[in-house]
Image (cartoon, rainbow, N blue to C red):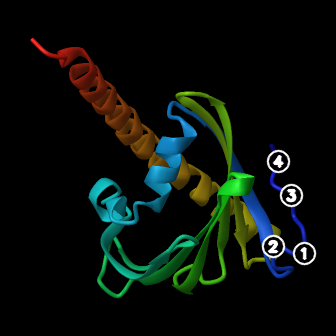
Amino acid sequence: MTCERTPADIPSELALAATYIREVRAGIERIWENVLDWEHLPALHEIYFNHVALIEIGGWGWRVELTKAGTADRRMLLELQIDRAKARYRVRTLAGEGTGTEIWTLLEPLGPQRTAIEVCFYLPEQRPERLAALGEKYRSSYARLWDQDEAMMVRREALLARSRTRSGGSGHR
């Protein structure tokens, strides 16, 4: 699994700032559920986001306006586009801080409750020293975001398993 830069996928004005790779203790179904759940952003990731408002949603993904933690004037317009067939998705910053940034995440199922992820951060920055510094910021932020998401997905899977056991094991007494 590697992020490949192709003209059809990545605009030429963007540069790869960093890559973040890890294994998540959740199946790909839980990950898709998490990715499509735009409402969890300020609830679970309150250190980064204060408020989220849905603008548009469909089978392709969603578009939301986010207010970043700090001040109310730090608004961003984000768009998520999913490609289930290729097990990947892209988040683009359409307006606000980081406009033009594209974050591509590739997913590789490793088992029922294990998925490898590779996140590539493409930024509209050409200065190598600035690109490296921003890339490191994105990498450390995403490590925290994925830690939080993973904990939520593991908990959800445990609750669903308990619910399945109860409903399947309760039978007729």
* 162, above or below 153, in the image: above
Callout 2 crowding tier (Cα within 10 Å): few <14, some 14–19, many ≥20: some
User: Helix or strand or loop: what does disc 3 sit on?
Assistant: loop
**Between marks 1 and 2, how big is the CA–CA gap?**
6 Å
Determine contact: label 1, label 2, CB under 8 Å. yes
Residue type at mark 4 is Thr
- How much space separates mark 2 and mark 3, taking CA atoms? 9 Å
Query: Which quadrant holds residue 105?
Result: bottom right
Residue 79 as seen in the image, left or right of residue 47 = right
Camera-side residue of 167 and 16: 167
In percent of the image, x 46 and y 82: which residue is there?
Answer: 76
- Pointers 2 and 3 in contact (C-beta within 8 Å): no
Give the CA distance from mark 1 to mark 3.
10 Å
Q: Earlier in the sequence, mark 4 or mark 2?
A: 4
Which residue matches tag 3? 4
Where in the figure is residue 49, as x and y percent of width and height? 35, 67
**48 vs 140: above or below:** below
Q: Which residue is mark 1?
A: 7
Please state which amino acid type lies under the numbered disc 1.
Answer: Pro
Q: Amino acid at mark 2?
A: Ile
Task: Say if mark 3 contacts mark 4, CB within 8 Å.
Answer: yes
Q: Given the current orientation, which residue lies at the most extreme front position? A: 172
Residue to which mark 4 is pinned: 2
Residue 155, by quadrant, is top left
Q: Residue at x 52, y 51 (%)?
A: 32
